[in-house]
Image: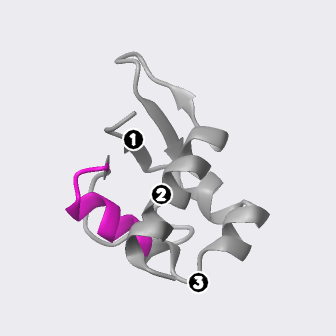
Amino acid sequence: MNVEHEVSLLVEEIRRLGTKNADGQVSVKFGVLFADEKCANLFEALVGTLKAAKRRKIVTYQGELLLQGVHDNVDIVLLQD
């Protein structure tokens, strides 16, 4: 799969699993995204796809590298609708 396609799939999954925050942006916890069975089957490298989306300013989150368990409560915020 190409990166653009994976990023677009990631956006769909964030919309499916996330909720609107106070600013009206959709956000989801990393742990929710990581533990979701559909996401596990879709993305070979979820963290890599998240980093690509962050570089393209499609999502934002605190930190550079997200690890399961340690960063489960980090919000992934969708910047583009």
Measure the C-alpha gap from mark 3 to mark 2: 15 Å
Amino acid at dot 1: Leu
Quick check: is 52 in the magenta stretch? yes
Label drawn at residue 78: 1
Q: Is residue 73 left or right of residue 18?
A: left
In terms of secondary structure, where does tag 1 sit? strand
Q: Nearer the viewer, residue 11 or 30?
A: 11
Q: Which mark is residue 44?
A: 3
Whether residue 22 is situated above or below residue 34 in the rendered picture: above
The amino acid on which the numbered mark 2 sits, given as a three-letter code, is Ser
**Which segment did they paint magenta?**
49-58
Q: Return the x and y of residue 55 as percentages of the image width and height.
A: 21, 63
Which mark is first along the chain, 1 or 2?
Answer: 2
- Secondary element at image label 3: loop
Viewer-side residue, 23 vs 12: 12
- For label 2, the SS is helix
Q: CA distance from mark 1 to mark 3?
A: 21 Å
Q: Residue at x 33, y 61 (%)?
A: 53
Q: Whole-percent x and y of residue 74?
A: 43, 50
- Label 2 sits on residue: 8
Q: How is the image coloured?
A: one colour
Name the residue located 64 percent from the left edge and 52 percent from the top edge.
32
Closest to the observer, 26 or 71:
26
